């Protein structure tokens, strides 16, 4: 029988799935890594990224538009189980917790994003709603950009 690590919190699936799309969009637009810190909640969430400088207002608007374009593709969200050995070289293994199970879970958002994740997700991006970036700030000292956002219901 396959054994996975227990998950210690229950995410709101639309918001958590949106996080995956935001992370991949940040990688594509800014060439950075996935978020360095995340607080994902039902009503509003925040993500921090390591960036050499603050994005411009135009770049923030483009990020919001790009994420919503991906959501509007109605992509399937699927899961695959592989071994840690198979995951090496394909994924950032640094984030695996100490003593992680040999079997890991890959979550894919269509052909847009794939990453190691044990969280809960929607079955299709059509269930997410639309991203609205509420505010953002940049800390020059730590070179971290924080975005605060919520999801607007579709229709």
Image: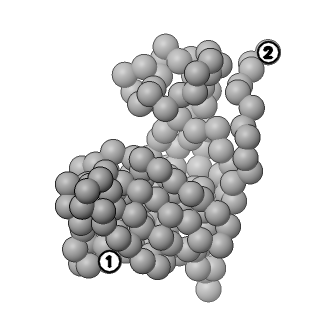
Q: In the image as oriented, which residue stretches furthest toward the right?
A: 1
**Mark 1 vs 2: CB contact within 8 A:** no
- Residue 76 in the image: state x and y as whole percent: 58, 52
Identify the residue at horizontal 42%, vertical 50% (top origin): 35
Q: Secondary structure at mark 2?
A: loop
Q: Secondary structure at mark 1?
A: helix
Query: Mark 1 or 2 closer to N-term?
Result: 2
> Of 104 and 140, which appears nearest the observer?
140
Rendered position, 83 above or below 35: above
Direction from residue 108 to residue 101 in the image, left or right: right
Report how far apart the C-alphas of labels 1 and 2 lie in the structure. 46 Å
Which residue is denoted by mark 2 in the rendering? 1
Q: Residue drawn 56% across and 17% down?
A: 83
Q: Say which quadrant the N terminus sits in.
A: top right
Position of the C terminus by quadrant:
bottom right
Q: Nearer the viewer, residue 141 or 28?
A: 141
> Is residue 114 depicted above or below 131 in this figure?
above
Residue 126 higher or lower than 86, as above or below: below
Residue 7 in the image: x percent, y percent? 72, 37
Q: 69 or 42, which is in the foreground?
A: 42
| Crowd class of label 2 (few under 14; some 14 to 19; many from 20; radius 10 Å) | few
- Report if residue 3 is visible in the image: yes
Label 1 Cα neighbours within 10 Å, binned few <14 / some 14-19 / many ≥20: few
Q: Residue at x 53, y 28 (%)?
A: 96
Residue 127 percent across, percent down from the top left: 64, 66
Please name the colour scheme applied to the rendered image.
one colour
Task: Find the residue positioned furthest to the bottom.
Answer: 155
Residue at which label 1 appears? 61
């Amino acid at each position: 029988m396959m054994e996975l690590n227990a998950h210690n919190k229950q995410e709101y699936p639309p918001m958590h799935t949106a996080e995956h799309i935001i992370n991949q969009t940040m990688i594509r637009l800014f060439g950075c890594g996935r978020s360095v810190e995340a607080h994902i909640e039902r009503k509003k969430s925040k993500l921090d990224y390591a960036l050499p400088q603050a994005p411009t207002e135009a770049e923030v608007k483009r990020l919001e538009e790009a994420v919503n374009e991906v959501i509007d593709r109605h992509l399937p969200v699927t899961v695959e189980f592989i071994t840690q050995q198979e995951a090496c070289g394909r994924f950032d293994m640094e984030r695996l917790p100490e003593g992680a199970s040999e079997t890991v879970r890959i979550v894919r958002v269509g052909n847009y994003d794939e990453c190691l994740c044990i969280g809960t997700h929607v079955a299709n991006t059509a269930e997410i709603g639309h991203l609205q970036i509420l505010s953002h700030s940049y800390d020059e000292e730590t070179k971290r950009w924080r975005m605060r956002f919520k999801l607007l219901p579709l229709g």
